[in-house]
Image (tube, rainbow, N blue to C red):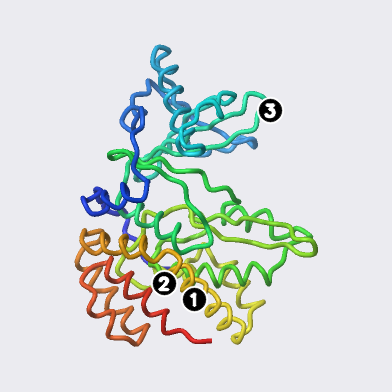
Amino acid sequence: MPHISRKKFTYKIGPHLRAYLKKYGRETDIPIHYSDLKLYKESIAFYDKKGKDTLWETCIYAPEEQERIYLHLLEIYALLKVGGDMQVVEHLGVDRIDVCLYGNTLPFRIRIINKLNDNFDYFYVKNADASRLYGLELEHLLSPNRISYLVSDNTLIEEHIVGIPGDEFVKHHIYEDDFNGTRLAKEFVKFNERCLIRLLGDMHSSNFVVQVTPDFDETNYRIRAIDFDQQSFEGRKNIYLPQFYKQNKFYFETVQKFVSKKSLTQYQREEKMVMIARMKAAKWPLLNLLDAMGKEPIAPEENVIKLREELAQYYESKRILRARNMGEMVKASLLEILRVRI
């Protein structure tokens, strides 16, 4: 299994990334920030429907503060979903605020409930980390998935990504009648390829979700990353390949079982060609993002040196050796796929 640093450094948003966020409408003013949510009086453990401790705790605020906090959080949800139009969300309310105490970043999870039908949604309030922001934006530009998030000063507002956690999917869904191992294997191959090309690390099964879509005669799957903290940080190539994590053993074995060597090559090339199309479609935002990424540090120098050597050997290319930092490494990796020919 790849070795992950126990605690990744948190990198502040630098001026170049800040300028990118403003230019592309990611930065906005919000009425309440991460630091305000930390002022809860106490918290109680939150258990799921089966009585299992979720490792999240529900926050309890002083009565005189709760109404104000809930109103501001609803305003933020309106900004995230409908451009700030409060009339559209007047039938919604904040049901609960949870904090995750076991992670490095201590995020807050906000549960929004529809008062008319009890339907609910979530969003997250986090400390903004430059690594995560680069990861979110690269996901938005280069994956099949669109990402909705906002930044205000050092606070990150992030949408909830719907899906079955990868580890839970293996425990409860692989024995269902409509399970399709071939299609899941194909999706994992493509997910594996995307992670390496854009250098997204730590993609073990707790850090991605599986979205299941019934088709008229089969079941389709999409694997989506939900944790972007390890974007372009670690110094080992295998950390950016989900196939090497022991938590992903089932997914790797599914590929071995259902995908021939010829099909494996086909799926990898398919994903590369689609990524090339995405790169062309998002040319200017991507170039501006990579430019900012190349001007501000998001990894220690020793990690850059180690990864540069491994990627140069993997790609059999001297282009990687000219990369001076992680931003330039991502750019060089993306340029390498332009050499792909079907």
The spot of residue 12 in percent (x, y) is 24, 48
- 314, above or below 327, in the image: below
Q: Residues within 10 Å of mark 1 (few under 14, many from 20)?
A: many
> Between marks 1 and 2, how big is the CA–CA gap?
9 Å
Left or right of 99: which side holds 271?
right
CB within 8 Å, label 1 to label 3: no
Figure quadrant of residue 328: bottom left
Query: Of the residues shown, which amino acid type is indicated by label 3?
Result: Asn
Return the residue nearer the eye: 224 or 61.
224
The spot of residue 126 in percent (x, y) is 37, 40
Residue drawn at x 24%, y 74% as measured from the top left: 323
- The residue labelled by disc 1 is 272
Residue drawn at x 64%, y 61% as measured from the top left: 221
Task: State the residue lying farthest toward the top.
Answer: 64
- The residue labelled by disc 2 is 197
Left or right of 285: which side holds 85?
right
Numbered tag placed on residue 94 in the rendering: none
The spot of residue 300 in percent (x, y) is 21, 62
Residue drawn at x 22%, y 51% as measured from the top left: 14
- The residue labelled by disc 3 is 117
Mark 1 lies on a secondary structure that is helix
Mark 1 vs mark 2: which is more N-terminal? 2
Q: Residues within 10 Å of mark 3 (few under 14, many from 20)?
A: few
Mark 3 vs mark 2: which is more N-terminal? 3
Query: Of the residues shown, which amino acid type is indicated by label 1?
Result: Lys
CB within 8 Å, label 1 to label 2: yes
Mark 1 vs mark 3: which is more N-terminal? 3
Which quarter of the image is occupied by the N terminus? bottom left
Query: Of the residues shown, which amino acid type is indicated by label 2?
Result: Ile
Return the residue nearer the eye: 38 or 51.
38
- 69, above or below 320, in the image: above
